[in-house]
Amino acid sequence: TLEPIPIANMSRWFRSEHMEYISLIVNEDAAHDCLADLGKLAAIQFTDLNPDLTPFQRRYVSYVRRCDELERKLRFFANECDNFGLTLESAGDIDAFLDSPSVLGSSARSLTSGAGKSDATGTQLLESLEVELEGYEGQLKELNAYSEKLTREYNEKVELQEVLEKARRFFMSDAPRMAVSELGGRKSSGARTDALLSGGDDEARDMDMRFSSITGVVATEEKVRFERMIFRATRGNCYVRFAPIKQAITDPETGSLIEKCVFIVFFKSLSIEAKLKKICDAFFAHRYSLPDMDDAPAVDRMLTENAQELVDSRTVLLKNQDTRFRLCQMLSQHTERWTWIVLREKAVYHTLNMFKADVSGMLRGEGWVISESFDDVRMSVNRAHSDMDHNMPSHVDQVPKPWPTPPTHFTTNKFTYGYQEFVNTYGIPRYREANPALFTAATFPFLFGVMYGDIGHGLFLFCAGLYLLWNEEKNDKAKLDEMTGGLHAGRYMITMMGFFAVYAGLVYNDCFSLGLNLFGSRWAFENEEPEDGDVADMTGTYGD
């Protein structure tokens, strides 16, 4: 004869799990391993025994801060990898990660899993992570700082090259006898002048008509405002020329490309020169000193030397970029696993902050545990103490409940998880209360089909659900974004919704909002061409 199925198993999803309130006393040295093993069970919820203490007064607050610092470094690594377009490699299945001990390593001694307990305690694990991540962070920051410096120097050489070429072209074509002064000052800093107009009678009159100039580079988007500001500040007593730079300039701080243009401003007064320099500084325009444009060999020599320095600077910059890329490529292989380790350690120390140190060297914790997992909790605590070779025994025992309402816990599977999460968005049932998710699993897809009933549209939804089910195993191990993860979690719900939508569409004889006559009609008119007022007769027996 078949044994009857226990009522408890039949109603497991209909009623929440039975809970027991326990007291847990562990050795301080074995507390970390105890909490790590208990976390794998996912069957216990601890109560905070230190409600009067602030987060900064907790026993393990220093460890939590160290985990926060490690998280900051890992976010820095992730951002740097993202700047190079590198995707962080998946660390595998989260359940397999939690079941495996972690051994710290670098590219040569990577974080791997093995049999038995962890080779390092929580403190040793954090120290090893801190040393390794500190080294990588130092290398990456040093390379970034060097890259920023090289980029700035390279940009200056590119801008100087463009300024020399544009200025020489301007003086050769538009003002063959015009000259400009250097940036550093007037006559004392190498300032020079050239005749703007030709045909003077004597040298004194020719010198009176000479103009000074300022040359530099400004962002293209600031060109109009820059020119307008110069016109207003000098009351139109300046002559401004612009020439665009075809090659975009890389911002050394943000790494974005910026369009810039070369400008040449001619002026006559010392007071105007002071105003122009202030305007250039306000618009973050880079000013450059030029040699005497009448001295063609000096200009060509300066162009040649700057071009050679430009090639050397680019070579060093590309070498630095390649070194940073290879470092980020290595970091992308381990960042996610390091992040999981830090999050696990942080969760353990957050939970240890809820424990109370009643006796020196011992920690006491209390919490709710699923009744059928009580023996597993006791075995995990005893195993952690035996592995640490502590003679002082641990203690796990039931205690009176501090309040009459235990927490609610439902055991779900792949099918019921989506419906349970759907119901939890509206509210979580009280302890041992009837679970609406059981009824929702049947009524919600059907009512959706009644509302959405259409053979064509429902078939698309049904096929989408089947596609998600077909790729279930692959998506379980893949890194999914928020929307794709939600679709994966509700894959069974989507499939049932599509099925009932097709079913209701057949009832409605509706496909892509077009009426169909799939099953014929049980009603007929006597005349082939009925008129208003004619009554149709039923051709079949009711209920057939």
Image (spheres, rainbow, N blue to C red):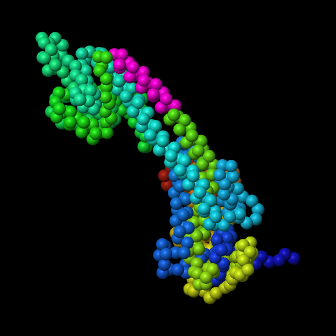
Query: Residue 212 at x, y = what percent?
Result: 22, 26
Residue at point 60%, 48% (across, down): 332
Residue found at the far right of this picture? 1
Query: Residue 443 at x, y = what percent?
Result: 60, 66
Q: Is residue 495 left or right of residue 218?
A: right
One can see residue 459 in this view: no
Q: Is residue 288 left or right of residue 147?
A: left
Residue 128 sits in quarter = bottom right
Query: Residue 63 at x, y = what percent?
Result: 56, 67
Determine the main secondary structure of the stretch shown in magenta: helix
Residue found at the far bottom of this picture? 400
Question: Which range of residues does the magenta coloring cover?
Answer: 296-315
Which quadrant holds the C terminus? Answer: bottom right
Which quadrant holds the N terminus? Answer: bottom right
Residue at point 80%, 77% (across, down): 4
Residue at point 52%, 62% (across, down): 68
Query: Residue 450 at x, y = what percent?
Result: 57, 60
Residue sitting nearer the eye, 284 or 195: 195
| Relative to 67, residue 146 above or below | above
Q: Is residue 220 left or right of residue 143?
A: left
| Relative to 188, residue 27 above or below | below
Say whether residue 92 is magenta.
Answer: no
| Relative to 346, residue 353 above or below | below
Residue at point 15%, 16% (across, down): 206
Residue sitting nearer the eye, 222 or 463: 222
